[in-house]
Image (cartoon, rainbow, N blue to C red):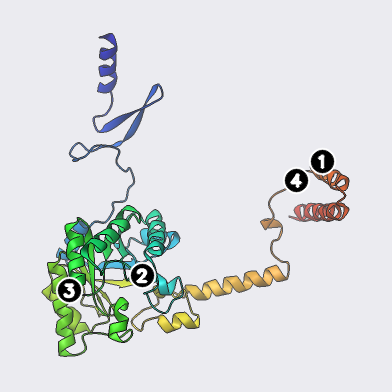
Amino acid sequence: MAFLFATRKMLSSVPRNRNLFQVGHGVSMMSNVPENTVYGGPQSQSSFQRVTVNHLKQKHRNGKPITVVTAYDYSSAVHLDEAGIDICLVGDSAAMVVHGHDTTLPITLEEMLVHCRAVARGAKRPLLVGDLPFGTYESSPSQAIGTAVAFLKEGAMDAVKLEGGAPSRISAAKAIVEAGIAVMGHVGLTPQAISVLGGFRPQGRNVTSAIKVVETALALQDAGCFSVVLECVPAPVAAAATAALRIPTIGIGAGPFCSGQVLVYHDLLGMLQHPHHAKVTPKFCKQYGRVGDVINKALSEYKQEVESRAFPGPSHTPYRIGEADVDGFLTELHKMGLSEAASAAAAAAVNGSREAGGD
């Protein structure tokens, strides 16, 4: 009874919104657990709040544009996070931008999951959406669900995106949503369908095609998608689709009348200027920087300084060895029969001492 009384007294002194966790013989405070949460357990103490589908719905209702940028690795994801981008899309465009293919078709599920995991480690605030790669969701609803589940369980994504409005893809979207996974649709130019489209061609440029864009977007909405990407369609078509839908539209080469916009990270930063990238950079992309020029200049300067032996200089050779240790080191080298190595080490030590003295 005395022990129970003491324990109750100790617990009564702990703030009610904190958990206790037994560590060895002590009691360690865990993170805050709001009393009105459905599930207990430690909660994040970070100042950020992850963007959710509900946040996007609220933003859409308030008429506030949604920002979307692709990312394929940890460092780019960190940049998106710090910039406050709403949605981070791990796009299958990585096939072209990162892996150097001419289309998005070759990238595999395994490769996409590697990109997803890297992005998830860097982007803590945006909604994370993973692009289902070609050939991983079209065969059957069960295949689509299995791939989508892998994106959440293995790729740490919050949602998935799939392309097109063919019946099989509408069925795939519906099945994934019914499995409890949020889905972003994609109509207009769908890069995975270039075999049928005859290349990267804009869509919606005649009556039949324009109506198809709107109908497909509506079908994806009916399937349960939380938003739809409109790629490479005329502005009036995008405006009509946006007005017809209750969910946000995300434009890419579709004009200013969408609910939000998406661009590829490398494109908007102007990271790559080599011929292959010029060939696959779309006309609609605005470059907000010329990062590629900065990279090229830095690499050229590095090459020049290495070849002229200007780098590394004293300020970039920070690690020292004491004189007594140098003598001992030289002695051991001579014992090993490495006289030439000893001479090189002695010269380097003298040179290092001279440079350090001149600093």
Q: Which residue is mark 1?
A: 324
Distance (Cα) linking label 2 and label 3: 22 Å
Q: Which residue is mark 3?
A: 167
Q: Secondary structure at mark 4?
A: loop
Which residue carries the number 4 mark?
321
Above-or-below relation of 193 to 328? below
| Cα distance between the residues tagged 2 and 4 | 50 Å
Q: Earlier in the sequence, mark 3 or mark 1?
A: 3
Q: Position of residue 115 (x, y in %)?
A: 40, 62
CA separation in Å, label 1 and label 4:
8 Å
Residue beneath the point at 43% across and 62% down? 73
Q: Is residue 203 left or right of residue 104?
A: left
Residue 23: image location, x then y, percent: 39, 27
The 10 Å Cα crowd at callout 3, few under 14, some 14 to 19, many 20 or more, is few
Dots 2, 3 in contact, CB < 8 A: no
* Quarter of the rendering containing residue 116: bottom left
Q: In the rendered image, which residue does mark 2 sit on?
A: 92
Closer to viewer: mark 2 or mark 3: 3
Q: Residue at x 13, y 73 (%)?
A: 218
Query: Would you say 329 lies left or right of 249 here?
Result: right
- How many numbered marks does the figure carry? 4
> Is residue 208 among the parts visible in the rendering?
yes
- Mark 2, other Cα within 10 Å: few <14 / some 14–19 / many ≥20: many
Disc on the earlier residue, 2 or 3:
2
| Amino acid type, label 1 | Ala
The numbered disc on residue 300 is none
Please report whichever mark, 3 or 4, sits nearer to the chain's N-terminal start.
3
The location of residue 200, given as percent across then percent down, is 33, 84
Q: Position of residue 54 (x, y in %)?
A: 19, 57
